[in-house]
Amino acid sequence: LEGALGGGPLAGKRVLVTSGPTHEPIDPVRYIANRSSGAQGTSLGVALAALGAEVVFVTGPADVPPPAGVQVIKVQTAQQMLAAVQTALPCDAAIFAAAVADWRVATASDRKLKKTKDGMPELEFVENPDILATVSQMTTGRPGLVVGFAAETNDVIENATAKLQRKGCDWIVANDVSPETGIMGGSENAVHLIWDGGVEDWPRMGKDAVAQQLAGRIAAALN
Ligand code: CTP
Ligand code: CA
């Protein structure tokens, strides 16, 4: 409502959000994907817009519809997501909630791969660009606040802290997605907010609530 009325603590701030999985083609009918629903990224887009931000929402093929009333750029692959992000810059803050495929098939076939008596196809993989690291390490025009996510199954704080340092982002939102937590694919999230020199453990709550808390923190950081 605040956003709709032109006020709110993020009024006049442009915030980029990436969300959802990416799909990496194998051939015209097949692709590599992951289990991201896009729910956490979508909740964030909604929460940021509600605080008055101008949200640019770059999304892969998610299960949930993108937030209403924001600029939505739909992509399929990691390479397309990087290009869309670069087009959307500059912005005041960038939040990378997408589950980007780490690898793609080196040369996707332009024809459907067929079964043959010679055995199975061999797929060669190449690494995708790291969108978060690319933006974090920009020397000119870097967003003032760059936030990554880290889904970990073990040694959550340690792995996420290493990720923060390796990529050069300002904050990492780390969550434990080991099967026994039931987080992956669910509506709740239990996260740790990590920055250089600090960690905050947030209680388990709905993904909407995580998004609202995080949007509030982003507003505080930009003001
Ligand atoms: N990310 C990205 N581009 C990639 C891979 C990841 O922008 N090609 C971003 C994600 O959106 C997330 C953060 O980087 O914000 C961490 O993603 P994650 O998959 O946990 O990190 P990786 O560096 O890919 O490490 P891992 O080997 O654990 O998958
Ligand atoms: Ca990864």
Image (spheres, helix red, strand yellow):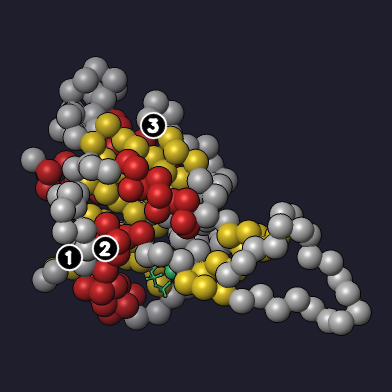
Determine whether label 1 and label 2 are within 8 Å by CB: yes
Disc assigned to residue 195? 1
Disc assigned to residue 172? 2
Q: State whether label 3 is within 8 Å of ligand 1.
A: no
Q: State whether label 2 is within 8 Å of ligand 1.
A: yes
Q: What's the residue at 91%, 79% (across, down)?
A: 117
Secondary structure category for the residue under label 2: strand
Q: Earlier in the sequence, mark 3 or mark 1?
A: 3
Residue 36 or residue 118, whichever sits in front: 118
Q: How would you rate the neighbour count of disc 3 (Cα within 10 Å): few for under 14, some for 14-19, many for 20 or more?
A: some
Disc assigned to residue 95? none
The alpha-carbon separation of the residues under discs 3 and 1 comes to 29 Å
Quarter containing the C terminus = top left
Q: How would you rate the neighbour count of disc 2 (Cα within 10 Å): few for under 14, some for 14-19, many for 20 or more?
A: many
> Is residue 171 something one can see in this rendering?
no
Q: Earlier in the sequence, mark 1 or mark 2?
A: 2
Q: Position of residue 120 (x, y in %)?
A: 79, 78
Q: Position of residue 38 (x, y in %)?
A: 48, 49
Q: Amino acid at mark 1?
A: Trp
Q: Earlier in the sequence, mark 2 or mark 3?
A: 3
